[in-house]
Image (cartoon, rainbow, N blue to C red):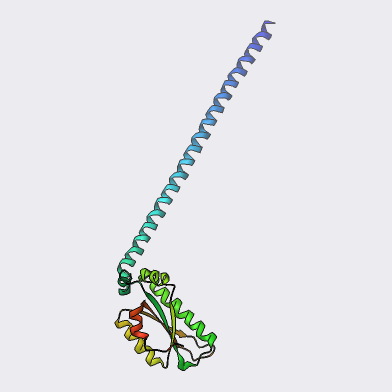
Amino acid sequence: MGDGCFWSSKLLLCILILGFDMIDMTWFSALLLGAGCLALGYLIGARHSVRVFLSSRVSKDAETVVDGKSKNRGKQPLEIEKLADILEDFKMVLVVRNDLKMGKGKIAAQCSHATLGIYKKLVNRAPKSLNRWEMCGQVKVVVKIESEDDMLVLQERAKSLNLQTHITIDAGRTQIAPNSRTVMAVLGPADMVDNVTGGLKLL
């Protein structure tokens, strides 16, 4: 009986010691696991932060380069932009080559090209002028001219007054020869545009 109690006590003591060891091992394992997760999270976070930092630096540098290009290579606002502050009446005139004998649909398409072409030229360099023109109802007048040479002379006259022009050049896939100058658009203060195109007849 005494030996049984002795061995029972020994067994109980071993179980308790083993239990505490298991508890200690569990806490120790949990501690190691937590420390490992913490270290892994720290590494991932640090790596992500470095990546974000580098990408932001690269984007800033890229913006700086772009800004540098825009400053160095960017075109200045057109002279017509200054007139938008003092003059209100703006118009666009479309000068159509009558000697090409284009059909009505062809003329409409070429006038559309010319309108879009001059708009794209002015949208960044003379936005106030476009706003003035739009506030005037986007006035467009279509006139005719009898030769390419006359159109080019007209363009030089417009340039001498600092008026922006755009000449549409056709690809020649349908009615006319390739690289034909078909329509010239000129946009600006109405009086100045009339000084250029006022002598032409309506189409």
Give the residue drawn at x 33%, y 84%: 195
Quick check: can you spot residue 76?
no
**Residue 18 placement (x, y as % from top left):** 59, 21
Point out residue 51 in the picture as x, y percentages from the top left corner: 43, 51
Q: Residue at x 70, y 5 (%)?
A: 1
Task: Give residue 203's position: percent from left, percent from top.
Answer: 46, 88
Is residue 22 something one can see in this rendering?
Answer: yes
- In the image, 172 versus 103, the foreground residue is 103
On screen, residue 117 versus residue 153, left or right, reads: right
46 or 92, which lies in front?
92
Extreme-top residue of the structure: 2
Whether residue 177 is situated above or below residue 38 in the rendered picture: below
Question: Residue 21, relative to residue 195: is it above or below?
Answer: above
As drawn, 149 above or below 18: below
Instruction: Classify residue 72 as left or right of residue 109.
Output: left
- Foreground of the two, 191 or 28: 191
Where's residue 184, x and y in %? 41, 84
Judged left or right of residue 38, residue 26 is: right
- 52 vs 150, nearest the viewer: 150
